[in-house]
Amino acid sequence: MNWFPNFTCMACEAEIQSSYNPYLCPKCMNNLPIMSETQTTHFSPFVYEEPIRSMILNLKYNDNGFIAKALAPYLAAVYIKQIQHLYEKPPIIIPVPLHRSRQNERGYNQSEILAHELSTYINLSINTSALIRKRKTTIQKQMDTKTREINMRGAFELSPTKTNLIKNQNILLLDDVYTTGATTNECKSVLLANGANKVIILTIASVI
Ligand SMILES: [Zn+2]
């Protein structure tokens, strides 16, 4: 009897017969765009290239939670190898929030799903209520670095009743993609301004 389920590869949609990772076929696993540059201010297991790019878009817009399961072990590996030792005490995971109206329309926040999958490996607590996206920002795809920064300014705030959850805490700020850093760096500034101790950014992929 074959107990192995007929899983589909989250990158190429081929049927997986056997693999270390039940969400990726061996061929895709061997061709992932692994980040080889040394990272110091933000961390990602991957460069924003195929098939990771399509997987992230699929996670973002097609409600495919298996993609988060496929990618979480890579986030966990980066955390354990490169980030963990930078904190003196374990951090809280904060996924970058969506604006309420966008989350309602999409039904979920992809960074929150990633946070839950990641925490199954590294056992950190997650906070999804302290950091709030107060302004609905325009889609940044076509903007340059400076315009993105201006677009993000004042987009986030800390829930007035939740600042005590952040004060003196270490934070692992989680997002899907690091492009220019406008979004995550704005979140980081808000967290630090409200008394967070150390904030480190982790994303699935970075544009380099
Ligand atoms: Zn594949």
Image (cartoon, rainbow, N blue to C red):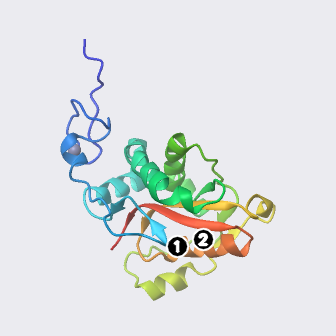
Q: Residues within 10 Å of mark 2 (few under 14, many from 20)?
A: many
Type of amino acid under label 2: Cys
Residue 137, picture quadrant? bottom right
**Residue 78 in the image: x percent, y percent?**
43, 55
Residue 15 appears in view: yes
Q: Residue at x 38, y 46 (%)?
A: 67
Which residue position holds label 2? 187
Q: Which mark is residue 183?
A: 1
Q: Residue at x 60, y 71 (%)?
A: 187
Residue 137 appears in view: no
Nearest the viewer among 144 and 101 is 144
Mark 2 vs ligand 1: CB below 8 Å: no
**Residue 190 in the image: x percent, y percent?**
66, 73
Q: Residue at x 57, y 54 (%)?
A: 104
Q: Is residue 60 left or right of residue 188?
A: left
Rounded to the nearest angstrom, the CA distance separating label 1 from label 2 is: 6 Å
Determine whether 26 is above or below 108 in the image: above
Secondary structure type for disc 1: helix
Q: Are marks 1 and 2 in contact (CB under 8 Å)?
A: yes
Nearest the viewer among 61 and 74 is 74
**Residue 41 in the image: x percent, y percent?**
49, 72
Determine whether 207 is above or below 76 in the image: below
Q: Residue furthest bottom?
A: 146
Q: Residues within 10 Å of mark 1 (few under 14, many from 20)?
A: many
Type of amino acid under label 1: Thr
Q: Residue at x 21, y 30 (%)?
A: 17
Q: Quadrant of the N terminus?
A: top left
